[in-house]
Image (cartoon, grey):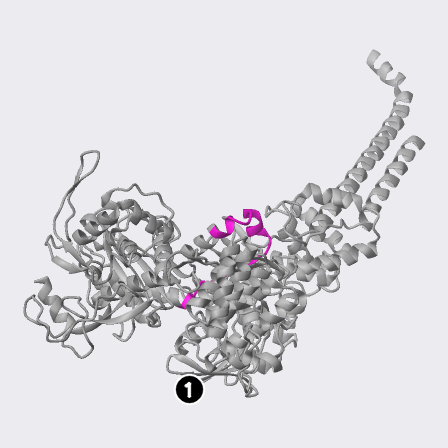
């Protein structure tokens, strides 16, 4: 009762309270709405700032691109037609019946017509032009413009051989909309966002369409995202699939459309879109995708190629043409059909395009290879002058001396030599490294850091410090030949056993490889036959510190202790250090620091940096000439003889074998006029190998030189060197018409006195007819 | 209520004010330019730059968007129009009569060997133009290109030495001239020129005696 009365008594106030409550609710609602509006406005302001900030600033960071040397074309250039065509193919030139547009080539016997693309180099712009190159033998016979006028020199675009990106980096080649084929935008819009030019960032029409398709089929077949939304998603947002993200995406899309033109958005899309994964590198944008899949600039792509790339947008890994060629082909043809349906291309054109193969470059071909060892060298040289961030973000162009054709030959010949060596015990554990350079320019042309050329780990060419064995000997002989009053090539040296005691009381007793003594030999023979006893004796005569000074003058920057064993190569060097050392001998005594980079352009194509050719004369030309002569004899009569099983004997080469103690390292270093190569073979654990310098490294070297065809070493004597007839047996002066007379070079003033006459009896064993038979006699 | 309305209006005004300003000023950032440490990628620098230029008009901002598009670089392999570094009619074609590009005045002394033609001549001509235009790096680069084509051509080394000297590197100039000498047997005029260049390089390095010696040898060779 009381309760009732109570309730009754509260009836009126209840109504009042109700009104009050609703007012309170309304007030709360308004407050909340205000908060919501404020929040939404805040979000909008924030998103707007984000959109504009990122879109108007630097949109992408672009890793530096590393280019091979451009192939120079001029009459007389040493280049065979096959290598030329290989390079053109790697550059994505299309074989056509006539070379009418840029990036096309027509071959007709020895005549190759091509239309180059032009390129911005450090020295200036190379124009795109139509050329006719005529080959004869292994060189270019003539170069002309397509109108028949002779042309002095032209060069191709350089091959892109790599980029400098940190791990998990996006890579792209930025393009402008006006550089893309019209077909690309048309196809992209047709496939991904038909209403692109009419919507305002989001397209309710396509959302409804997508909803309809998805609900009626029961699965997520179609996305309703516009190109703008896709761009926003990739550009600003993460990949999560939540409503909040969807809403943010829609808002940002509208904001983006508000501020930027359709052209801007389309261009950004073309550069942003993800189109494939290459190891740790993500391939973004159509510019790079075109290079990555076809090795061609985007502007050259034809319908079937454009359709493939556009089709891949939907699922770059699902439609990966390298992994899923059938799927990719089906998708490509679907895109072509769609374009034909819409009338963008005519039926005939479409039918033809559908008949074309995918046309993507093969993995492992010249166009699609990695060169980890050389790229490592480039990176190291660049890091001395540029910050990592500049290299990975500023879109620099790095021009190197890398020669992809020589690299390919080095790789192939290393592999072939391993096949030839198969069966030797433990050969599988033997690693290898190789440095190829041009001694006249000091440029590194090719580099192998492992027996597996694609291996990107330990770079033995740059980092494996191994005893160089007999490779040090040319320094010993050069040190001697620098003193012509005391030493000549025909100076007698003793090859006999001896021991020396060091100050610490250790006794050093060198031995020859064949454990024999060879008695009195000519100085040059000590080097040619790689005799340890005579070499060590010669070195000790001059003093170890003196020889080590010569080693340093050759370019080796190491402080080896002056132990006698250093005379026989106990000191360790990396293959590239050996190349530097031998380069000084190959280049007339002028030292050139080895370079891999020529120049650097910034993203705008403006010169940024250059690595100039620098030289320093370290030795007298005459002493170097005599050393080269002794090293030439290594190849004709000494430990390097077997090279001429592969290389024509007319090619003059100079070199030196090297074998460290217990066959732990097999080395060969040698050169012609325009090519120097150093090969090392050995085990990473420094174990014994089944190889000497001659049976291992030299075989790789010889196989490589056979393919690379170096020019003969130019043996024109310098002005202080004269050629003198001497008796091959005694080394005494002789005359041209005397039996057994041979010509030897001497530094003027150090030559032997002319012999009295041929018949002068010489108090030595029976006369010989030729140098060779004499040597044989001497050895026995 | 009216209190709320006032707050609402005030807030709205504030917001539209802010967003209005934002709308009209796309942050203007110099995104191209030289590699200066950090500046390009430093977002704080970018923001402060944006704040400073908040007053820019929409038109100016659009313009900036257009210029910032310059950072959309050319496809490397695509043809790039631009400065031609040599004129085809003058240099790239093989001249009917080989033109000597000898540095030394008396060209009548040149033997056939000293006359250049073909690619080397074309590149030396290009280099000369670059040098004349004050582009020493470009000239040196073109000469190195010539040197790769004809590594034992002493005239290329002479010209390279000359450019190095002009670049203020007399040490390298002397070395390159020495290398040139090693390839110029039987070319007395060129030898004299190289010695003369060595004399200048030595003088610049303060080696007066060496310069005189080189000068003397230059005369002997002539």
**With A730 as the anchor, is A276 left or right in this view?**
right
Answer yes or no: is residue A359 visible.
Answer: no
The residue sitting at 12% across, 69% down in the picture is A774
Q: Residue furthest right?
A: B2
Q: Residues within 10 Å of mark 1 (few under 14, many from 20)?
A: few
Residue A668 position, x and y percent, is: 27, 59
SS under mark 1: loop
Residue A129 position, x and y percent, is: 58, 78
Q: Is residue A735 above or below residue A658?
A: below
- Determine if the magenta segment contains residue A602: no
Q: Residue furthest left?
A: A766
Q: Is residue B61 above or below residue B124?
A: above
Taking depth in this image into account, of B98 and A392 the one nearest to the observer is B98
The residue sitting at 55% across, 51% down in the picture is A392
Across the whole image, how many numbered discs are drawn on residues? Answer: 1
**With A721 as the anchor, is A25 left or right in this view?**
right
What's the chain of the residue with tag 1? Answer: A
**The N terminus of chain A sits in image quarter:** top right
Residue A382 position, x and y percent, is: 51, 52
Magenta residues, as a range? A381-405
**With A504 as the anchor, is A331 left or right in this view?**
right
Taking depth in this image into account, of B213 and A692 the one nearest to the observer is B213
**The C terminus of chain A sits in image quarter:** bottom left
Quadrant for residue B167, please give it. bottom right
Pointer 1: what residue? A109
- Determine if the magenta segment contains residue A382: yes
Residue A436 position, x and y percent, is: 37, 61
Quadrant for residue A428, please give it. bottom left
Q: Is residue A513 above or below residue A291?
A: above
């Amino acid at each position: 009762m009381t309760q009732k009365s109570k309730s009754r008594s509260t009836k009126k106030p209840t109504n009042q309270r109700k009104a009050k409550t609703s007012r309170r609710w309304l007030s709360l609602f308004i407050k909340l709405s205000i908060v919501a509006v404020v929040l939404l406005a805040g979000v909008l302001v924030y998103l707007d700032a984000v959109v504009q900030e990122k879109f108007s600033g630097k949109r992408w960071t672009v890793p530096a691109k590393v280019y091979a040397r451009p192939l120079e074309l001029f009459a007389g250039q040493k280049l065979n037609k096959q290598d030329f065509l290989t390079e053109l193919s790697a550059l994505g030139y299309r074989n056509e019946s006539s070379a009418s547009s840029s990036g096309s080539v027509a071959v007709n016997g020895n005549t190759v017509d091509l239309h180059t693309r032009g390129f911005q180099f450090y020295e200036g712009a190379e124009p795109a032009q139509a050329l006719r190159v005529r080959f004869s033998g292994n060189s270019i016979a003539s170069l002309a413009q397509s109108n028949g006028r002779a042309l002095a020199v032209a060069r191709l675009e350089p091959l892109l051989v790599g980029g400098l990106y940190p791990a998990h980096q996006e890579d792209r080649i930025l393009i402008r909309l006006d550089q893309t084929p019209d077909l690309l935008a048309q196809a992209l819009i047709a496939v991904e966002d038909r209403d692109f030019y009419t919507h305002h960032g989001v397209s309710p029409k396509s959302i409804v369409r997508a909803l309809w398709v998805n609900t009626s089929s029961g699965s997520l077949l179609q996305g309703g995202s516009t190109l703008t939304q896709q761009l926003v998603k990739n550009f600003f947002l993460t990949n999560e699939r939540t409503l909040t993200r969807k809403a943010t995406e829609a808002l940002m899309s509208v904001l983006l459309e508000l501020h930027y033109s359709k052209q801007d958005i389309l261009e950004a899309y073309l550069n942003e879109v993800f189109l494939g994964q290459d190891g740790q590198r993500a391939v973004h944008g159509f510019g790079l995708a075109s290079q990555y899949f076809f090795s061609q600039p985007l502007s050259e792509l034809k319908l079937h190629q454009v359709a493939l790339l556009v089709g891949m947008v939907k699922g770059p890994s699902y439609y990966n043409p390298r992994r899923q060629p059938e799927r990719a082909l089906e998708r490509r043809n679907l895109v072509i059909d769609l374009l034909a349906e819409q009338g963008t291309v005519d039926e005939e054109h479409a039918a033809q395009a559908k008949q074309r193969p995918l046309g993507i470059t093969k993995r492992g071909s010249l166009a699609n290879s990695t060169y980890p060892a050389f790229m490592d060298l480039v990176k190291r040289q660049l890091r001395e002058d540029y910050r990592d961030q500049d290299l990975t973000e500023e879109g620099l162009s790095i021009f190197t001396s890398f020669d992809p054709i020589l690299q390919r030959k080095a790789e192939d010949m290393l592999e072939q030599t391993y096949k030839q060596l198969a069966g030797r015990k433990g050969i599988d554990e033997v690693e290898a490294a190789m440095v190829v350079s041009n001694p006249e320019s000091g440029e590194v042309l090719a580099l192998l850091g492992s027996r597996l050329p694609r291996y990107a780990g330990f770079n033995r060419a740059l980092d494996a410090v191994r005893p160089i064995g007999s490779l040090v000997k040319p320094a010993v002989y050069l040190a001697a030949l620098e003193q012509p009053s005391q030493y000549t090539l025909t100076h007698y040296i003793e090859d006999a056993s001896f021991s020396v005691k060091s100050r610490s009381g250790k006794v050093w007793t060198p031995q020859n490889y064949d454990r024999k003594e060879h008695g009195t030999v000519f100085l040059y023979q000590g080097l040619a036959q790689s005799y340890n006893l005579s070499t060590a004796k010669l070195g000790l005569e001059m003093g170890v510190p003196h020889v080590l000074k010569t080693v340093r003058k050759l370019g080796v920057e190491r402080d080896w202790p002056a132990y006698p064993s250093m005379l026989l190569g106990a000191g360790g060097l990396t293959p590239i250090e050996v190349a530097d050392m031998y380069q000084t001998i190959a280049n007339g005594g002028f030292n050139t620091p080895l370079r891999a980079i020529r120049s650097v352009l910034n993203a705008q194509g403006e010169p940024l940096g250059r690595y100039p050719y620098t030289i320093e004369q370290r030795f007298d030309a005459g002493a170097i000439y005599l050393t080269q002569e002794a090293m030439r004899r290594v190849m004709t009569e000494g430990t390097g003889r077997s090279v001429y099983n592969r290389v024509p004997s007319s090619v003059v080469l100079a070199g030196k074998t090297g074998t460290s103690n217990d066959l732990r390292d097999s080395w060969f270093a040698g050169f012609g006029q325009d090519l120097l190569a150093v090969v090392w073979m050995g085990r990473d654990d420094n174990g014994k190998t089944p190889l000497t310098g001659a049976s291992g490294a030299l075989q790789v070297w010889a196989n490589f030189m056979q393919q690379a065809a170096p020019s003969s070493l130019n043996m024109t004597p310098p002005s202080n060197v004269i050629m003198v007839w001497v008796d091959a047996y005694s080394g005494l002066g002789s005359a041209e018409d005397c039996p057994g007379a041979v010509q030897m070079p001497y530094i003027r003033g150090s030559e032997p006195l002319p012999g009295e006459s041929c018949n002068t009896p010489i108090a030595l064993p029976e006369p010989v007819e030729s140098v060779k038979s004499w040597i044989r006699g001497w050895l026995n | 209520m009216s209190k709320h309305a006032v707050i609402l209006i005030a807030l709205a005004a504030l917001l539209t004010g802010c967003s209005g300003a934002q709308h009209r000023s796309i942050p203007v950032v110099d995104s191209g330019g030289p590699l200066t440490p950090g500046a390009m990628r430093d977002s704080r620098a970018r923001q402060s730059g944006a704040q400073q230029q908040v007053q820019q008009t929409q038109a100016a901002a659009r313009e900036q968007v257009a210029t910032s598009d310059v950072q959309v670089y050319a496809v490397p392999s695509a043809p790039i129009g631009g400065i031609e570094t040599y004129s085809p009619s003058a240099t790239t074609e093989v001249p009917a009569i080989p033109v000597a590009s000898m540095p030394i005045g008396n060209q009548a002394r040149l033997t056939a060997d000293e006359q250049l033609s073909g690619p080397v001549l074309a590149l030396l001509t290009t280099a000369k133009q670059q040098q004349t235009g004050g582009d020493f790096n470009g000239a040196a680069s073109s000469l190195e290109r010539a040197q790769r084509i004809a590594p034992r051509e002493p005239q290329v080394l002479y010209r390279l030495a000359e450019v190095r000297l002009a670049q203020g590197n007399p040490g390298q100039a002397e070395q390159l001239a020495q290398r040139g000498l090693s390839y110029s047997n039987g070319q007395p005029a060129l030898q004299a020129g190289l010695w003369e260049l060595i004399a200048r390089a030595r003088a610049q390095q303060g080696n007066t005696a060496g310069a005189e010696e080189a000068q003397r040898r230059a005369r002997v060779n002539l």
